[in-house]
Amino acid sequence: LGDSQINDINALSGLTNLMSLGLSDAQISDISVLSGLTNLTYLHLAENQISDVSVLSKLTQLEVLYLYENQISDISALSRLTNLTSLDLERNKISDISALSGLTNLTDLSLWKNQISDVNALAGLSNLTKLYLDYNQISDVSVLSGLTNIEILYLNNNPISESDIESLKSALPNCDIS
């Protein structure tokens, strides 16, 4: 249903066996109707006007969640989504990512173009293979050196010293860091 002018998704409330849903670029701001769709494993809600994602805390079967290009600042509700393997929150208004610290199944995480300065919450996400943190306000990346499974790490346009980047490259020799 992507790339449409749909803004009322109430008709979806009865589809409780639905496992996959794509509603990108659809002018949606209210996603409260999704609270009953607890069998969803894939949810694509990118390019909408969503600011409140609290209802998503009930969708604990989710494995893939795309929320890029919305108006999200509070992601605390995502802390219960421990089955997530892929999460895309790029181009939002997020500064606090502490809710992500327990999402240890994540392999792919995109947080570029937000307002993040502290990445310590990512220290325990040892399954990450791809991490996109470009265009934030991150200066201390030392905690990322423990993410030994990481293959791709994007840090462009952050106030990180060249020596810190070199330290990361030494600690993560199999990682493409840019």
Image (cartoon, grey):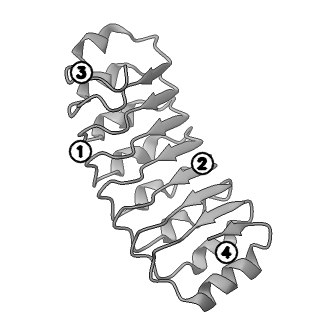
Disc 2 marks which residue?
106
- Give the quadrant of the C terminus: bottom right
Of 151 and 25, the residue lying toward us: 25
Instruction: Check disc 1 and give the amino acid type.
Output: Ser
Sequence-earlier tag: 4 or 3: 3
Sequence-earlier tag: 1 or 4: 1
As measured in the structure, the alpha-carbon distance from the residue carrying label 2 to the one carrying label 3 is 30 Å
- Is the residue under label 4 in contact with that under label 1 (CB below 8 Å)? no
Of 54 and 158, the residue lying toward us: 158
Instruction: Check disc 3 and give the amino acid type.
Output: Ile
Disc 3 secondary structure class: loop
Disc 3 marks which residue?
6
Of 61 and 20, the residue lying toward us: 20
148 up-or-down from 164: above or below: above
Instruction: Check disc 4 and give the amino acid type.
Output: Ser
Tell me residue 83's x, y (percent): 56, 38
Disc 4 marks which residue?
145
Disc 1 marks which residue?
51
- Give the quadrant of the N terminus: top left
26 vs 103, left or right, is: left
Sequence-earlier tag: 2 or 3: 3
Kindly identify the residue that appears in the image at 76 percent across and 81 percent down.
170
